[in-house]
Amino acid sequence: MMLPMPFLSKLHTRFREVTKMRSVDAMPVAEADAFKERCSRVNIYSHSKKQTDLMEQLLEDLWIHIVKPILDHLLHGQASQQNIKEESKAWQIPDQDKRQRLWWCCQGDFSFLPLHAAGIYHGDSPICISDFFISSYTPTLGALIDARNRPLPHELKVLAAAQPDAGSTKLMKVGEELKVIEQIVPPQNLIYLNNDRHLDLEGKHTSVETVLTKLPEASVLHLACHGTQDANNPLRSGFLLERGKRLTIHKLVQYRYPNAFMAILSACHTASNDAEQPEEVMNIASALMFLGFGTILGTKWPMSDLDGPIVAKFVYNALFNQQITPEALKQTSPWVMERLFGDHLMKLKTFSSESDPGYAEAFQELTKDHIAARTEGSARTLATFSLARVVDDLAREMRRNKVPAERWATFVHIGV
């Protein structure tokens, strides 16, 4: 697919207008002062109708000129020349549970664009990429293959850290975000940064050194804080922790993480590429993927502080309260399920279809074993967990609740 460069440049210019906010600490002081109320998780959006309309128009342009032609090839085998809005109405939209995965491996000028959110969200017949596929990103195909081949950790351990005070504005909701995690995740599955067996809601113990010391034990990393993107030196991009010290990519790559599985990066710009340097593929999320965290929730631009607790609720309810279904089983890595629930799978394979007598009983036995693994906090529950689906469900729920597009579209899934 060939697009004229002036068109891509125009898209980039307009997206920069909507997502212009950058982390304060990556800016010159004078520029930071001018943007300090707009560039963090706090009060980053005025949510004016004009701004929301502009974002929705941009997402419609992405749909019409980029994503819709790709779906034509995927669903029909050829790009249609008919009216692009009218024809898409006739597409067969699959059941939500039967949608397949789609990975975007964006390079160059496409790396800045939120293709996962492309769609028409107004009028009588809204339509979007999420109706047909569950979108994910990967920095390279090699990174995705490596992530798919990594074994699951032996234990499910969550390291959750928040820092409300490090940036120019106080993050009022990160403490609530950690409270949500503490309410859902069993104590035996939490890694504490202090000695009082409670998550550090105020960030008193979230030093760079403490997080780096504890992180190799973790299979899940959750950071709720200010994020910084350094366009001039990507290795200096990272998270602001205790006393404003930065947990940078440069510091992270000096350690090994043998138990790494998932990262929830509840901060600004964690999966963003710089529009001025589109060939630079390194961002915080992709760096963590290369370090072993194979499935990641990140942000394309600043997120709202209000959404942090919502993200935590969606992720950890799905992880610790999920129900296995036949459709979820079909989308799970076969070799992973074979290793963790092999006896049940062998029994299910003796039936030719789900309607056969005895299949429901055999599946119920698998469900009971899965619930037992979940109750004991076993890493076996990760075998059927899909963060990509959780991120997709989060965006769909926010759209149903009339949340402006600039808030829900920032959340992306990277990896497996």
Image (cartoon, rainbow, N blue to C red):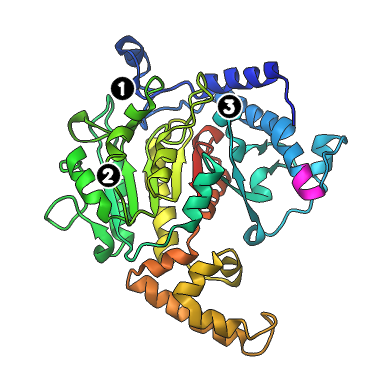
- Disc 3 vs disc 2: which is toward the camera? 2
Alpha-carbon neighbours of circle 3 within 10 Å: few (<14), some, or many (≥20)? few
| Mark pair 3, 2: CA separation | 30 Å
Residue lying at 30% horizontally and 47% vertically, measured from the top left: 176
Q: Is residue 75 magenta?
A: yes
- In front: 51, or 203? 203
Residue 40 x %, y %: 36, 28
- Residue 28 seen: yes
Q: Amino acid at mark 1?
A: Asp
> Of callouts 2 and 1, which one flags the residue occurring earlier in the amino acid sequence?
1
- Disc 2 vs disc 1: which is toward the camera? 2
Question: In this picture, which residue range is highlighted in magenta?
Answer: 72-76
Which residue reaches farthest left?
195
Judging by the rendered image, the residue that carries numbered circle 3 is 108
> Of callouts 3 and 2, which one flags the residue occurring earlier in the amino acid sequence?
3
- Residue 323 seen: no
Judging by the rendered image, the residue that carries numbered circle 1 is 25
Residue 322 x %, y %: 46, 66
Locate residue 325 relative to residue 373 in the image: left or right.
right
| Mark pair 2, 1: CA separation | 24 Å
Compared to 352, does 190 lie above or below?
above
Q: Please, what secondary structure does the residue beneath circle 2 have?
A: loop
